[in-house]
C-alpha cells in the first residue's frame, strides 16, 4: 500500500478562506480575553479587517485558475468573483450588524440563554450591550460561504454548507426584541436546514454510487460516459439539488424564508438575503455547469418549472403580505426565481448575468433592510405596513430612498434591478429558454403591485397617530444606505464595468 | 448649426432644470415657478433653433444623429436621432410645456403640498418625454418609456384630485404591464437581431427573423403602445388618470404622453416588423374604429368634464390608429399631423376646462350652466377649443382628420365610413357639453361662487393665445408641418413595403397634397 501523501496545496489560492477562518477563531479568543466594554469595538474591527484582508487576497489572486488540495477546491473566475461579491456584501452586512446607536445596545440580545419574559430578560432588553459573539459567527459563516462557492467536490461542498449554515441558525435566534419569534425562526430554519443537508448528503452518496467519485470533474466524465444505472444519477442529482434549492429559497423549498426573515434580527436577515443568496447560487451554478452539464436536457425543464413556480409564489404571496419583512422575504423568493432563469440559460451569458444579478440584488436588499431597521416605535422595529402610512411626509429623505430601492426591485430602468433583469432575460432567450422569460415578465407585473402599494402608502396616505418616528441612522447604517443606493444607481446607469468583469470571470475550470 | 448636439442637449436641459427647481425651498414658491417657466421657455427656444436647422428638402430621414457608447457588452448606446415625425412631436412638447407650466401657476395648494416639487416633476416629465422621442436606440427608448411613468405617477398621486391614489396606481400598473410585454419583445429582438439596439441596424436585421416569431415580437411592442395610446380595450386607465390629474398635467398626459404609443407603433412596430404589421392591420383597424365609436358614446354620457375630455381623446386616438394602419402616405401623414393637432386642441380643451374647474371647485358638468353669461370670454375660448376638438374646418384638426379619412378610404372603405360616424358623435359630445356648461339659463348656485364671475385673466390669456393661434394657422396653412412629416412617413411606408394605391379617377387629381 502506498503511504498517504499530502496533496500539493496552493496556499495563495486558499488565502481568503484561511484569513477568515483564522480571524473567526481569533474572534472566539477575543471573547475570552478582552473586557466586555471594549469587546464590541475590537470584534467589529477584527471582523472588518479580516474581510478587507480576504478581499485584498481575492483581488491579488484574480488571475488564478487552478484546482488544489487534491481536487477539493477550485479557484477560477466564478469562484473569485463570487468570493469577492460575498466579501463585499458581507463587509457591508457586518456594518449593519455592528450598528449600536439606532437602538441602545444594538439589535442583538445580550444573553440568549436567558428565559424569555423573565426578570433578567426585562433587564437585558433595556439596554444591556448585545452579544459580541455575532462577529465571529458571521465571519465563520462568511468563510464557509467562500469555501461553498469554491468547492470542487461534493463532500467539501457539504462541509462548507454546514460551516456557513450553523452560525446562521444561531444568529437567527439572537434578536433583542420579539425573542420568541426569533427563536422560533431559528429552530424552524435549523430543522428544515438539517433536512435539506441530509438530502444533499444522501444525494452525494447516490452520485458517488453512479460516478465512483465525488469530484465535479469525475461526475462530468461519468455523465458523459455512464458506466452504471442512470437512476442513481437522477436520484442523486435530485437530492443534491434539493439541498441547494433550499438554501437558495426556491419553491417548493422556500417555506422557511418568510418566517426566518421576519424573526431573525434585521441585520442578519440582510446578511442572509445578500450573502447566502450569492453562496447558494454560486454552488448551484458550479454543480449544474461543471458536473451535470451533460444531462441539461433532463434537468432544464424540471428546474425551469421550479423557477416558474418560485416566481409565481413569490410574486403572488408578496401581494398579500402586511409585514414589510415578510414582503421582502417573498420578494427575495421571486428574485431567486429570476436568478434561476439566468442559471438555466446554461451558457456563458447565463453565468455572467446571474453573477451580475447577485451583486446588484445584494446591494439593493441590504439598503432595504437597513431602512427597515430605522423605522421604529417603542416596541422596536415597526414592520407592519400600516405603520408606514404617510412616512414620506415625516421623513421624505428616507421614504425617497426606500421608494428608489422599491423601484429597483420592480425593475424600473436606471436602477440595477432593470439591468440585472435584462441581463438574465437576455441570457435565457439566447439559451433557448424563452418560456421562462415570458413567465418572468408576467410575474414582474404581479410583483410590481406590492412594491407600489408600499410607495403609495408612504407618499400618498395621510400620516396616522401610529406612524412612528424615524430613527437617525448611525454612521454605520448611513454608510450602508449610501453604498446600497449608490451601487443600485451605478449598476443601473453605468453597468458596463461590472458586466465586463462578470464576462471575464465567466469560465469554470473542470 | 447642423453640428450642434441638439437632441442630447434638449433632453438633458429639462433634467437639469428639474434638479434646480427641486432644490428651491418650499417657501420660495414664486421663484420656483419663474425658474420652471424660464427653463421651459429656454427649451422652446432651443427647439425653434432645431426646427430652423432641420433640412426639409432632400434631407436624410434621420437628422441630428449623435451616438455615445453606453454598455458596449450589450451594444447599447446613447443614440439620439430625429426623423420628421419625432421632430414635430418634439416641437409640440416644447410648446406645450411652457403653456402648461403657466396654466398650472396656482394649481398647487401651498398649505399641504410643495409647489417646487410639482414644477420639478413637470420638468423631469419633460425630460423623459423629449428623451423618448429623441432616442434612436431601442434600449434607450425603453428606458425613457418606463421612467416617464414615475414623474406622472407622483403628479397624479400627490397633486391630483378625487380618486387620485387609485388613478395613480392604475396608471402606473397599466403602463408597467405594457412596458414589461415590450421588454420581453426587446430582449427577443436584441438576441435575434444580432445583439444591437441601433434602430437602423435592427430594421435591416429583422428581415431575417421568421414570420411567426416576428408576429409575437410585434405583439409585445403593440400591446405596450396600445395601452399607452390608449386603444380600445386597453383604455380604461385614461379616464381615471385624466379625471384625477391636475388639468395641466392631464393636458400633457393626453397631449404628449399618449402620443408615445402612436409614435411607437409608427416608428418601431411598422418599421421593425413589416409583415406582422400588415398581418395585424385589420385587427388594429377594427380596435381603432371600435374605440372611435365606443369612446365617443361614453363621452356623450359623461358628467365629469375632465373624464369627458379624456374619452374624446380616446376617440381621437382611434382616428390616429386607422391612419397608421391604413398604410397610405396620406393617411400616415394625416395620423402624424393628427398627433400634433390633437396635442394642441385637446391640450387647450383640458387647460380651459382646468380654468373652469379651478373657479368652480368642481369638475361636474351639472355644477355649471349658463356660464357664458358670467364669463363670456372664457366661455368663448371653451367654445373654440371644443370646435377645434371636433375638427371644424378652419381649425387644424380638420386637416388631419380629413387626410386620415381620405387616406383610409382609398384602401379600407368600410373602416373609413364607420369612422366618419365618429365625427357626428364628436359634434354631439362637444356641443352638448358646451350647451350644458356655458349656454342656457344661469345655474343659480354659480352666483354664490365669487370666482365664477371673474373672466379670463391676463395670465390665462397668455396661456391660451399661442394654442389658439397655432390651431388657426395650421388649419389654413399646414404645409410647413406636412413637409417635415411627409418624407418620414414615406420612408416608414417603404419599410412596411406598401405602395400608395394609384388613383382610379384620372381627372380627380391629387387630394390633400
Image (cartoon, rainbow, N blue to C red):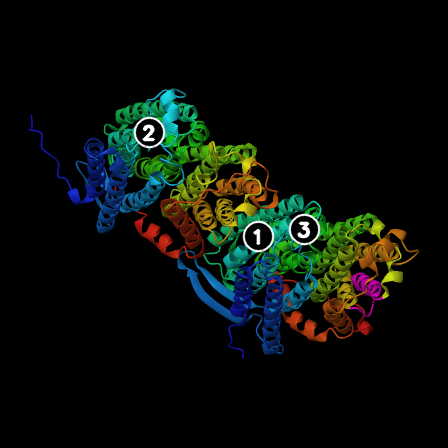
Element carrying mark 2? loop
The residue singled out by tag 1 in the image is B150
**What are the residue bounds of the magenta stretch?**
B377-395
How far apart marks 1 and 3 lie (CA) works out to 15 Å
Left or right of A29: which side holds A289? Answer: right
Residue name at image x 22 percent, y 43 percent: A16
Q: Is residue A147 visible?
A: no
Give me the chain letter of mark 2. A
Sort mark 2 into few (<14), some (14-19) or many (20+) by Cα contacts within 10 Å. many
Q: Magenta includes B391?
A: yes
The residue that label 3 is drawn on is B160
Viewer-nearest of discs 1 and 2:
2
- Residue A110 image label: 2
How far across and down, in percent of the image, does residue B256 sit?
A: 66, 60
Q: Position of residue B347 (x, y in %)?
A: 72, 61
Q: Dot 3: within a 10 Å radius of its alpha carbon, few (fewer than 14), some, or many (20 or more) residues?
A: many
**Image vertical order of residue B140 relative to residue B472, above or below:** above
Q: CA distance from mark 1 to mark 2?
A: 44 Å
Q: Is residue A398 left or right of residue B314?
A: left
**Mark 1 packing: few (<14 Cα in 10 Å), some, or many (20+)?**
some
* Quarter of the image that includes the N terminus of chain A: top left
Looking at the image, which is closer to me, A51 or B20?
A: B20
Rendering coords of residue A33 (x, y %): 18, 33
Compared with residue A321, is residue B160 higher up or lower down, i.e. above or below? Answer: below
Would you identify the image quadrant in which residue B503 lies?
A: bottom right
Q: Are marks 1 and 3 on the same chain?
A: yes
Amino acid at each position: 500500500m502506498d503511504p498517504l501523501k499530502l496533496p500539493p496545496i496552493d496556499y495563495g489560492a486558499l488565502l481568503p478562506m484561511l484569513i477568515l477562518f483564522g480571524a473567526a477563531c481569533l474572534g472566539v479568543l477575543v471573547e475570552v480575553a478582552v473586557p466586555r466594554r471594549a469587546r464590541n469595538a475590537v470584534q467589529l474591527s477584527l471582523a472588518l479587517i479580516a474581510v478587507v484582508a480576504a478581499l485584498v487576497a481575492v483581488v491579488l489572486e484574480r488571475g488564478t485558475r487552478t484546482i488544489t488540495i487534491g481536487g477539493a477546491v477550485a479557484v477560477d473566475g466564478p469562484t473569485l468573483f463570487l468570493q469577492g461579491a460575498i466579501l463585499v456584501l458581507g463587509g457591508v452586512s457586518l456594518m449593519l450588524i455592528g450598528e449600536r446607536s439606532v437602538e441602545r445596545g444594538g439589535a442583538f440580545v445580550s444573553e440568549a440563554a436567558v428565559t424569555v419574559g423573565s426578570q433578567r430578560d426585562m433587564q437585558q432588553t433595556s439596554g444591556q450591550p448585545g452579544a459580541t459573539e455575532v462577529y465571529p459567527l458571521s465571519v465563520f459563516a462568511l468563510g464557509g460561504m467562500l469555501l461553498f462557492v469554491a468547492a470542487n467536490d461534493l463532500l467539501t461542498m457539504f462541509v462548507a454548507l454546514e460551516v456557513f449554515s450553523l452560525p446562521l441558525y444561531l444568529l437567527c435566534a439572537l434578536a433583542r426584541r420579539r425573542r420568541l419569534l426569533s427563536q422560533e425562526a431559528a429552530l424552524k430554519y435549523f430543522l428544515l436546514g438539517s433536512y435539506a443537508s441530509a438530502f444533499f448528503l444522501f444525494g452525494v452518496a447516490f452520485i458517488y454510487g453512479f460516478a465512483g467519485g465525488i469530484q465535479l470533474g469525475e461526475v462530468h466524465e461519468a455523465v458523459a460516459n455512464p458506466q452504471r444505472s442512470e437512476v442513481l444519477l437522477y436520484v442523486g442529482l435530485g437530492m443534491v439539488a434539493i439541498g441547494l434549492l433550499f438554501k437558495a429559497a426556491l419553491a417548493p423549498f422556500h417555506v422557511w424564508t418568510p418566517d426566518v426573515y421576519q424573526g431573525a434580527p434585521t441585520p442578519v436577515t440582510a446578511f442572509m438575503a445578500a450573502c447566502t443568496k450569492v453562496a447558494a447560487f454560486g454552488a448551484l451554478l458550479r454543480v449544474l455547469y461543471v458536473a451535470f452539464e451533460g444531462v441539461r436536457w433532463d434537468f432544464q425543464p424540471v428546474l425551469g418549472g421550479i423557477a416558474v413556480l418560485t416566481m409565481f409564489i413569490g410574486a403572488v404571496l408578496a401581494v398579500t403580505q402586511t409585514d414589510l419583512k415578510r414582503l421582502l422575504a417573498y420578494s427575495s423568493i421571486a428574485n431567486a426565481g429570476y436568478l434561476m432563469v439566468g442559471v438555466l440559460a446554461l451558457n456563458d451569458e447565463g453565468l455572467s448575468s446571474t453573477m451580475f444579478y447577485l451583486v446588484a440584488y445584494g446591494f439593493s436588499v441590504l439598503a432595504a433592510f437597513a431602512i427597515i431597521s430605522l423605522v421604529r416605535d417603542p416596541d422596536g422595529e415597526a414592520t407592519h405596513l400600516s405603520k408606514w402610512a404617510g412616512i414620506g411626509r415625516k421623513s421624505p429623505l428616507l421614504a425617497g430612498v426606500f421608494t428608489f430601492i422599491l423601484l429597483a426591485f420592480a425593475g424600473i430602468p436606471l436602477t440595477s434591478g432593470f439591468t440585472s433583469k435584462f441581463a438574465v432575460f437576455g441570457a435565457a432567450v439566447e439559451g433557448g429558454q424563452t418560456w421562462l422569460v415570458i413567465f418572468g415578465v408576467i410575474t414582474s407585473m404581479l410583483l410590481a403591485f406590492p412594491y407600489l402599494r408600499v410607495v403609495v402608502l408612504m407618499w400618498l396616505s395621510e400620516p396616522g397617530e401610529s406612524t412612528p418616528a424615524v430613527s437617525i441612522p448611525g454612521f454605520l447604517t448611513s454608510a450602508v444606505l449610501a453604498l446600497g443606493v449608490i451601487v443600485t444607481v451605478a449598476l443601473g446607469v453605468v453597468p458596463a464595468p461590472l458586466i465586463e468583469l462578470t464576462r471575464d470571470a465567466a469560465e469554470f475550470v473542470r | 448649426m447642423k453640428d450642434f448636439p441638439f437632441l442630447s442637449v434638449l433632453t438633458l436641459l429639462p433634467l437639469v432644470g428639474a434638479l434646480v427647481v427641486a432644490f428651491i425651498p418650499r417657501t420660495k414658491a414664486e421663484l420656483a415657478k419663474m425658474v420652471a417657466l424660464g427653463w421651459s421657455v429656454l427649451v422652446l427656444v432651443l427647439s425653434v433653433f432645431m426646427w430652423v436647422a432641420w433640412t426639409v428638402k432632400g434631407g436624410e430621414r434621420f437628422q441630428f444623429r449623435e451616438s455615445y457608447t453606453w454598455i458596449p457588452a450589450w451594444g447599447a448606446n446613447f443614440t439620439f436621432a430625429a426623423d420628421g415625425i419625432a421632430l414635430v412631436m418634439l416641437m409640440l412638447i416644447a410648446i406645450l410645456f411652457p403653456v402648461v407650466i403657466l396654466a398650472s401657476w396656482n394649481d398647487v395648494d401651498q398649505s399641504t403640498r410643495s409647489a417646487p416639487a410639482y414644477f420639478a416633476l413637470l420638468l423631469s416629465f419633460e425630460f423623459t418625454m423629449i428623451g423618448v422621442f429623441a432616442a434612436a436606440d431601442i434600449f434607450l427608448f425603453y428606458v425613457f418609456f418606463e421612467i416617464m411613468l414615475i414623474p406622472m405617477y407622483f403628479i397624479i398621486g400627490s397633486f391630483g384630485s378625487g380618486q387620485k391614489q387609485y388613478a395613480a396606481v392604475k396608471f402606473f400598473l397599466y403602463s408597467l404591464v405594457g412596458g414589461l410585454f415590450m421588454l420581453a419583445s426587446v430582449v427577443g429582438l436584441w438576441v435575434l437581431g444580432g445583439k444591437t439596439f441601433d434602430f437602423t441596424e435592427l430594421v435591416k436585421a429583422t428581415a431575417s427573423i421568421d414570420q411567426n416569431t416576428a408576429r409575437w415580437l410585434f405583439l409585445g411592442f403593440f400591446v405596450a403602445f396600445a395601452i399607452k395610446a390608449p386603444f380600445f380595450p386597453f383604455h380604461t386607465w385614461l379616464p381615471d388618470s385624466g379625471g384625477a390629474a391636475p388639468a395641466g398635467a392631464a393636458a400633457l398626459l393626453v397631449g404628449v404622453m399618449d402620443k408615445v404609443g402612436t409614435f411607437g407603433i409608427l416608428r418601431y412596430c411598422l418599421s421593425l416588423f413589416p409583415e406582422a404589421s400588415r398581418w395585424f392591420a385589420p385587427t388594429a383597424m377594427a380596435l381603432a374604429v371600435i374605440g372611435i365609436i365606443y369612446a365617443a358614446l361614453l363621452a356623450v354620457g359623461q358628467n365629469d368634464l375632465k373624464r369627458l375630455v379624456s374619452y374624446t381623446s380616446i376617440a381621437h386616438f382611434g382616428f390616429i390608429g386607422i391612419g397608421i394602419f391604413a398604410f397610405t402616405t396620406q393617411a400616415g401623414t394625416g395620423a402624424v399631423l393628427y398627433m400634433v393637432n390633437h396635442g394642441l386642441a385637446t391640450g387647450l380643451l383640458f387647460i380651459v376646462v382646468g380654468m373652469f374647474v379651478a373657479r368652480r371647485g368642481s369638475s361636474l358638468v351639472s355644477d355649471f350652466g349658463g356660464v357664458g353669461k358670467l364669463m363670456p370670454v372664457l366661455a368663448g375660448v371653451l367654445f373654440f377649443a371644443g370646435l377645434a376638438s371636433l375638427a371644424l374646418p378652419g381649425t387644424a384638426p380638420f386637416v388631419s382628420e380629413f387626410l386620415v379619412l381620405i387616406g383610409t378610404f382609398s384602401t379600407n372603405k368600410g373602416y373609413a365610413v364607420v369612422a366618419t360616424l365618429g365625427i357626428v358623435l364628436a359634434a354631439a359630445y362637444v356641443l352638448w357639453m358646451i350647451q350644458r356648461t356655458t349656454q342656457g339659463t344661469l345655474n343659480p348656485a354659480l352666483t354664490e361662487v365669487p370666482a365664477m364671475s371673474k373672466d379670463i385673466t391676463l395670465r390665462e390669456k397668455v396661456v391660451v393665445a399661442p394654442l389658439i393661434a397655432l390651431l388657426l394657422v395650421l388649419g389654413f396653412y399646414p404645409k410647413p408641418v406636412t413637409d417635415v412629416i411627409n418624407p418620414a412617413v414615406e420612408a416608414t411606408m417603404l419599410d412596411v413595403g406598401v405602395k400608395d394605391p394609384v388613383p382610379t379617377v384620372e381627372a380627380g387629381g391629387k387630394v390633400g397634397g
